[in-house]
């Protein structure tokens, strides 16, 4: 009795397995034969339109004043008083700072005393020379004694000139203890405080940094050698700064400097962009995200770049066989050069339910759309961007098998 029950259970299990197998096979067969996506729903498409394309090259740069003057000191001393601070507007000749003049005044007094002593010596030498000439005329002194008197007079004059120069130097150094602004502008930085010692022995210390005019600024930016060939003076520039994320600023390429900078075998060139800062919203040191307009086309046919990247799943790349075997090598080389100078692309359109390839000549791009120069496309033509069926098959094939 138990044996027959087991056999009956096995028969039921086998029957259920066969039914399930037939159901799965029928579902797969129906999906392969009848579940065909309509052509109009299979592809993602877009239209060829008229529009504007602006091609740019991008880099980061730093905003700087056009003229930034470092105000220093030619003499050493202790800062006694400061008359200017950060962001102050100053005029040319205005006093910015005073150094303690005590040591230089002492040097000037010493030079003045030496000069008076030299002047007295000169007066005595002049009197001796005049007396010697009179005595020489009466033959009371020799010619040698007269020559010695003349030589002493000349030495006295030279010594007086030395002390006069020293006095002039010390007087000038005394004037240098008062630091004045060389230009009119805005104090961007103050580097010293009252009581600080300024040492000008080896190099001129910087006391202030003055921007001559913040209404006019410049962006110093670096472009790679691959991009610098398309940049020249006068090109329009758009840029943004983090301080005003929703505002676009404009400028003009002022200079492409010839001095290269090489870092880890990467060569870059400094491109200077002139910027109007009438409202003075831009401040020195801000980071600017610069886009230089190198080409622009208006009222042209454009196609989205996704259409140029699309290829049907069954497309094969076949190399074109060379034609005109009787042409010489120079002729073939000329044809290759012409072909290299023209950029071409391939897009696909729907024709009788199939994807048809169309060759086109392309121009500039803004990384989203590309200019169509020539080809069998017109405004309103529908091009293929993506094959949904191929994408679904790819995603299905990527699912791991469970058995």
Image (cartoon, grey):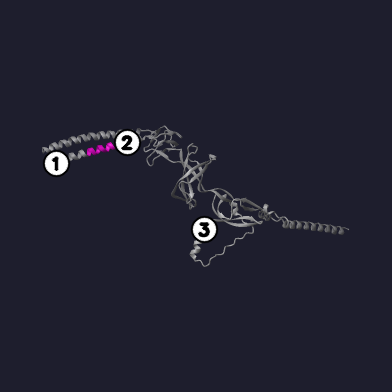
Spatial CA distance of label 2 from label 3 is: 73 Å
Q: Relative to residue 204, is residue 291 drawn left or right?
A: right
Give the residue displayed 18% in from the left and 39% down from the top: 150
Viewer-closest of 272 and 40: 40
Give the residue displayed 22% in from the left and 39% down from the top: 155
Secondary element type, mark 1: helix
Residue sitting farthest toward the right: 1
Our reading of the magenta stretch's main secondary structure is: helix
Q: Relative to residue 363, is residue 164 drawn left or right?
A: left
Is residue 163 within the magenta segment?
yes
Is mark 3 in CB contact (under 8 Å) with mark 1?
no
Image disc number at residue 340? 3
Give the residue displayed 74% in from the left and 58% down from the top: 29
Crowding at label 2, few (<14), some or many (≥20) Cα neighbours within 10 Å?
Answer: many
Say which quadrant the N terminus sits in: bottom right
Tell me where the magenta segment starts and ends, as one range. 155-170
Viewer-closest of 100 and 398: 398
Residue that carries the numbered disc 1 in the rendered image: 143
Q: Nearer the viewer's eye, disc 3 or disc 1?
A: 3
- Figure label count: 3
Q: Relative to residue 223, is residue 13 drawn left or right?
A: right
Secondary element type, mark 2: helix
What percent of the width, then of the height, locates residue 242?
A: 53, 41
What percent of the width, then of the height, locates residue 239?
A: 51, 43
Is residue 255 within the magenta segment?
no
Residue that carries the numbered disc 2 in the rendered image: 170
């Amino acid at each position: 009795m138990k044996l027959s029950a087991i056999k009956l259970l096995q028969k039921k299990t086998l029957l259920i397995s066969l039914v399930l197998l037939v159901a799965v096979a029928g579902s797969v067969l129906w999906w392969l034969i009848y579940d065909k996506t309509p052509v109009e729903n299979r592809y993602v498409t877009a239209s060829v339109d008229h529009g504007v394309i602006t091609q740019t090259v991008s880099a980061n740069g730093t905003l700087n004043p056009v003229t930034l003057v470092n105000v220093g000191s030619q003499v050493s001393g202790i800062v006694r008083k400061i008359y200017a601070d950060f962001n102050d507007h100053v005029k040319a000749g205005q006093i910015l700072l005073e150094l303690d003049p005590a040591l230089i005044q002492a040097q000037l007094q010493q030079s003045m005393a030496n000069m008076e002593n030299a002047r007295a010596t000169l007066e005595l030498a002049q009197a001796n020379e005049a007396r010697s000439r009179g005595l020489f005329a009466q033959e009371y002194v020799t010619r040698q004694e007269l020559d010695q008197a003349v030589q002493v007079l000349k030495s006295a004059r030279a010594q007086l000139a030395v002390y006069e120069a020293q006095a002039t130097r010390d007087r000038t150094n005394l004037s240098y203890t008062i630091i004045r602004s060389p230009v009119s502008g805005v104090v961007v930085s103050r580097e010293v405080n009252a009581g600080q010692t300024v040492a000008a022995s080896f190099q001129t210390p910087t006391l202030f940094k003055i921007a001559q005019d913040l209404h006019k600024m410049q962006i110093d930016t670096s472009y790679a050698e691959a991009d610098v060939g398309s940049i020249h003076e006068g090109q329009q520039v758009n840029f943004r700064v983090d301080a005003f994320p929703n505002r676009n600023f404009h400028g003009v390429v002022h200079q492409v400097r010839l001095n290269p900078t090489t870092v880890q075998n990467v060569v870059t060139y400094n491109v200077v962009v002139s910027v109007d800062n009438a409202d003075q919203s831009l401040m020195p040191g801000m980071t600017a995200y610069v886009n230089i307009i190198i080409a622009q086309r208006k009222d042209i046919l454009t196609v989205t770049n996704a259409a140029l990247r699309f290829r049907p799943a069954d497309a094969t790349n076949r190399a074109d066989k060379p034609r005109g075997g009787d042409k010489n090598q120079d002729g073939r080389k000329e044809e290759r050069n012409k072909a290299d100078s023209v950029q071409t692309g391939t897009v696909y359109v729907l024709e009788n339910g199939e994807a048809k390839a169309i060759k086109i000549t392309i121009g500039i791009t803004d990384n989203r759309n590309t200019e169509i120069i020539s080809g069998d496309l017109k405004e309103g033509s529908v091009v293929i961007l993506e094959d949904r069926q191929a994408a679904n098959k790819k995603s299905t094939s990527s699912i791991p098998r469970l058995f």
